[in-house]
Image: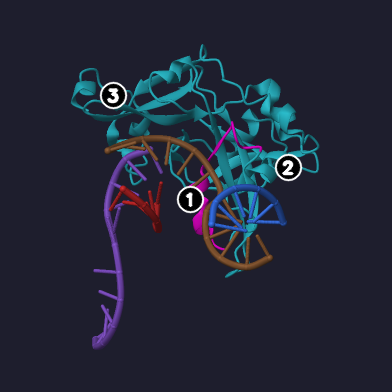
Chain colours: A cyan, B brown, C blue, D purple, E red
Amino acid sequence: MCGRFVQAHDSVFYADAFHVETIRTDDLPVSYNVAPTDQVYAVAEHDGVRILGSFRWGLIPWWAKDRKIGARNINARAETVADKPTFREPFAKRRCLIPADGFYEWQRLPKGKLPHYIYAADRRPLALAGLWSSWKDPDSGDRVLTCSIITGEPNQLVAGIHDRMPVILPEEDWSLWLDRSVTDPEELASLLTVHPHDRMAEHPVSTLVNSVANNLPECVQPLETGAVEQQ
DNA sequence: CCAGACGTTGTT
DNA sequence: GTCTGG
DNA sequence: CCAGACGTTGTT
DNA sequence: GTCTGG
């Protein structure tokens, strides 16, 4: 799945990488350990214009009575996203790209869990397929923008680590994915295929990343050779 | 009809 | 709001 | 995803 | 075990 990832650049960097025309958010704190309920950058389209905004990670459907439901919706399965009540409308009408320098997956080993950092070999940000929603807090009246990351089968690189991974969209699919006039579920589902692995890389990292309190560059550093055995 | 869920992952 | 279960 | 709590009453 | 918070 995708329960932690990295957004360690500023808004201008992601705006450039995703050909965004309008930045509609302040800069967020740099994060090497983005966790559910954190504010994250995401790219969406409004009136045909590509916009970089800030969204709370964990989709809250517009009809929800309180924000707690969001924590359960950090991911949406590619296999069922078109049918589930929570995700069907966002899938048809409110898709986004969530920039990620890389993401973490935990590998289960006999002696415990070993986190891995997975990223593009050229270190450019990945485009994670996402959905967004706008929810009005009935207490404060505030509008809260939220998002979810779509997960699918792992590619060959990730398969040895975990049985799920975020769906990564190649640049040639970005426009169609963000186009709000496209609502055909079958056409959209055809984009959620396994991403090739030949231009991606991964390495084990310290269990420092396990705690959301640890937000440091060390989270993405390769584990020292030999230290793997101690994990 | 009304009531209650609406989600994913992992673990056992 | 919309679907499922009873 | 992992970590950490998991409870109530009354009093300050 | 299961839920909540981050």
Q: Is residue A175 visible?
A: no
Residue at the spot x=80%, y=39% of the render?
Answer: A48
Q: In the shown orientation, is residue A33 left or right of residue A184?
A: left
Which residue carries the number 2 mark?
A: A93
Q: Are marks 1 and 2 on the same chain?
A: yes
Is A68 included in the stretch rendered in magenta?
yes
Q: Residue A153's spot in the image, x, y percent?
A: 51, 24
Q: Residue A175's spot in the image, x, y percent?
A: 73, 29
Q: How many marks?
A: 3
Q: Name the secondary structure under disc 1.
A: helix
Q: Residue A86's spot in the image, x, y percent?
A: 61, 48
Q: Residue A93's spot in the image, x, y percent?
A: 73, 42
Q: In the shown orientation, is residue A93 left or right of residue A139?
A: right
Amino acid type, mark 1: Ala
Marked residue chain, label 2: A
Amino acid type, mark 3: Leu
Marked residue chain, label 1: A
- Mark 3 nearby-residue class (10 Å; few <14, some 14–19, many ≥20): some
Amino acid type, mark 2: Lys
- Segment colored magenta: A65-82
Which residue carries the number 3 mark?
A: A223
Q: Is residue D10 above or below residue A94?
A: below
Residue A71's tag is 1
Residue at the spot x=38%, y=22% of the render?
Answer: A161
Mark 1 to mark 3: distance in Å? 30 Å
Cβ atoms at labels 3 and 2 below 8 Å apart: no
Q: Quadrant of the C terminus of chain A?
A: top left
Mark positioned earlier in the residue sequence (3 or 2): 2
Mark positioned earlier in the residue sequence (1 or 2): 1
Mark positioned earlier in the residue sequence (1 or 3): 1
